[in-house]
Amino acid sequence: MATSRRGFVGGMSAAVVFSGGAAFAQKKYDDGATDTEIKIGHTNPYSGPASAYGVIGKGIEAYWKMVNDKGGINGRKVKFVSLDDGYSPPKTVEMVRQLVEQEKVLCVFNTLGTPTNTAIHRYMNQRKVPHLFVATGASKWGKPKEFPWTMGFQPDYHTEAAIYAKHILANVKDPKIAVLMQNDDYGKDYWEGFKDGLGKDINKVVRHVTYEVTDPTVDSQVIQLKDSGANVFFNIAIPKFAAQAIRKAADLNWKPVHYLNNVSSSVASTLKPAGYDNSQGIITGLWLMDPTDKQWNDHPEMKTWREWMAKYMPGANTEDGNYIYAYAVSTLMLETLKKAGDTLTRENLMKQAASHQKLRVPLVLPGITVSTSPTDFYPVQAIRLARFKGETWELFGDVLSAEST
């Protein structure tokens, strides 16, 4: 993990360089940028209930090492300062204040978790520090009018859940739906989208239970859901609890049509711990290539990723889709910084983040591109459904987006 240490601090515009009496080049910097360095801040749950996501931070750190080995960005090396917040909102506030006020980073990038990002949302916007490509799909990260310094990355939970709801109504005869939900903003965002997708058929939900991230297990909740007589299960949980719920349903011999939220779709983090036998037939929405899906083995982007993993993350689990995520989101950040050129101000960084047009980001599923604008802060807005079979996901159906719902 990257550690905090004193580094270069920007904050002053570089002098205009004159050549033959005319301005040759002008560099503009805010805090966190100099002629030689770009400093990026990040928080991740390397410990605590969401520690399965800690590999994302490690993957991002390895990505910037690769970038630096290749000469950096426009000649500048990236200093990536990653701190452990334990998936605890008060700790996130403390860590992010350290990054902004002491480390003086240019931006904060891919901070993970809905409750944790909610805790710093207003602060980042009051300080006018870019809060970019956050690692959460809550719909609130795409509201540039109210929060012009915060931008999401992945498909929003509201849209994803609405797609599941529509799929259930179209494919399950007489559905009786049970919902397990993490009791925070992340869970509620999925729940609101699911209700919107069901519309007048909201009465098809026969049991809805919640859990806290401090709970040791969700066993009692799954028992309640089974006892409701439900034949459909929507599992809104982070990997630790999603895996527990899959295992418990199998222990109870409860076999509903099972929908799993995308944030727990990693084979290595969720399905393998839950047991492959227990996971057969589960449905999720994917927007990234899955490293366990053999159809991508010969794809040039997957080959490049595997070479990168072998060199920069030797010994890491190549079945963990979180490393795919880390690589993809880091590539988007790299492209944004490249576009900013020598004008490394916070304002210009947000301007560049909001001007991607149908950008092909490596490892995103074919047919899905990244587009943003000053009024569109949702970079990725589509998914494909997939069913777990054997030891991997099998994609089916078309690319689905918000318009599909």
Image (cartoon, helix red, strand yellow):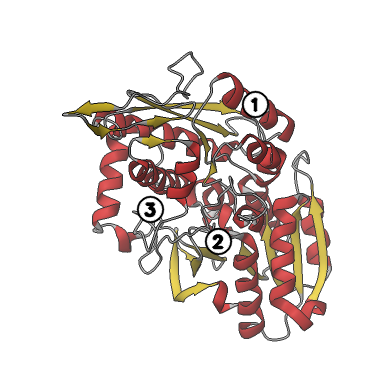
Residue identifier under label 2: 375
Residue at image mark 3: 291
Pair 3/2: label in front:
2
Specify whether 286 is left or right of 336.
right
| First along the sequence among labels 3 and 1 | 1
Query: In this view of the protein, which residue sits in the foreground, 398 or 279?
Result: 398
Q: CA distance from mark 3 to mark 2?
A: 33 Å
Task: Report which residue position mark 1 lands on.
Answer: 97
Q: Secondary structure at mark 1?
A: helix
The image shows residue 318 at horizontal and vertical percentages of: 38, 44
Residue at screen point 65% across, 31% down? 86
Pick the quarter of the image with the C terminus: bottom right
Q: Nearer the viewer, mark 3 or mark 1?
A: 1
Residue 111 in picture, x, y percent from top left: 57, 39
Does dot 2 land on a helix, a strand or a loop?
loop
Tell me whether the residue at label 3 lies in contact with that at label 1, contact meaning CB atoms closer than 8 angstroms.
Answer: no
Residue 279 seen from this side:
yes
Along the viewing direction, whichever of 183 and 20 lies nearer the viewer: 20
Amino acid type, mark 2: Thr
Q: Is residue 132 left or right of residue 63?
A: right
- Mark sitting earlier along the chain (2/1): 1
Q: Give the secondary structure at mark 3.
A: loop
Viewer-nearest of labels 2 and 1?
2
Q: Is residue 12 above or below residue 223?
A: above
